[in-house]
Amino acid sequence: DFADKMAALLGINPARIIVVDIRAGSVIVDFVVTEDDDEVDPDADGDVDSDDSGSNNGGGEDPQPNFSNLSAQQVVEKLTTAASDGQVAKEFEAQVLDLNTKVIKLEPDDGKDDEKPT
């Protein structure tokens, strides 16, 4: 499905991708990539430190996927690169005609109800 393919392309957990809308015409997919719940600590070179503990369990089972903890801005940069160099078109077997991205910082919910009592 779209979220799984896009997550694999970006190297992030598919749970971070939420498909908002799919429209006809050309195929237009609106989706959101949420922030990772884990802290993001990029190195000076932009790579993200990851904890590889448990990735080699030696028990013959497939290791758990090692998703990177990319920030929203890093995801936008990776997606833009993947679209411009043809990776997105190859993965989805469709030409990318347009790509619009933006990063929105959401404020945490303070738990207060916004409705005024009547």
Image (cartoon, rainbow, N blue to C red):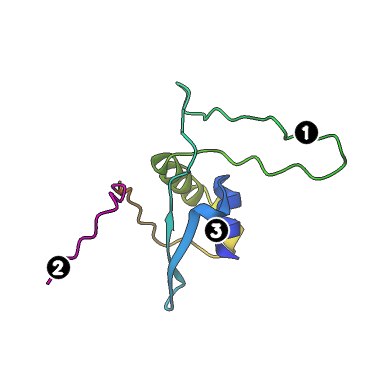
Task: Give the distance between the C-alpha atoms of the residues marked 2 and 1, in whole angstroms.
Answer: 56 Å
Residue 89 badge: 3
Q: Start and end of the magenta stretch?
A: 107-118
Which comes sooner in the sequence, label 2 or label 1?
Answer: 1
* Number of numbered callouts drawn: 3
The nearer-to-camera label among 2 and 1 is: 2
Query: Which residue is located at x 14 percent, y 68 percent?
Result: 117
Task: Tell me if mark 1 has few (under 14), some (14-19) or many (20+) residues whose alpha carbon lies within 10 angstroms of its own.
Answer: few
Mark 3 to mark 1 CA distance (whole Å): 33 Å
Q: Which mark is residue 56?
A: 1
Q: Quadrant of residue 23?
A: bottom left
**Left or right: 23 as drawn, with respect to 91:** left
Q: Position of residue 100 (x, y in %)?
A: 35, 56
Indicate the amino acid at tag 3.
Ala
Q: Quadrant of the C terminus?
A: bottom left
Mark 2, secondary structure of its residue: loop
Q: Determine the residue located farthest toward the left in the rendered image.
A: 118
- Quadrant holding the N terminus: bottom right
Q: Nearer the viewer, residue 107 or 89?
A: 107
Residue type marked 1: Asn
| Disc 1 secondary structure class | loop
Give the residue drawn at x 42%, y 42%. 77
The residue depicted at 46 percent of the width and 72 percent of the height is 27
- Specify the quadrant of the image occupied by residue 71: top left
Say if mark 2 contacts mark 1, CB within 8 Å.
Answer: no
Q: Is residue 66 above or below residue 94?
A: above
Q: Earlier in the sequence, mark 3 or mark 1?
A: 1
- Tell me the residue at 52%/30% (across/down): 48
* Residue 12 badge: none
Q: Which residue is mark 2?
A: 117
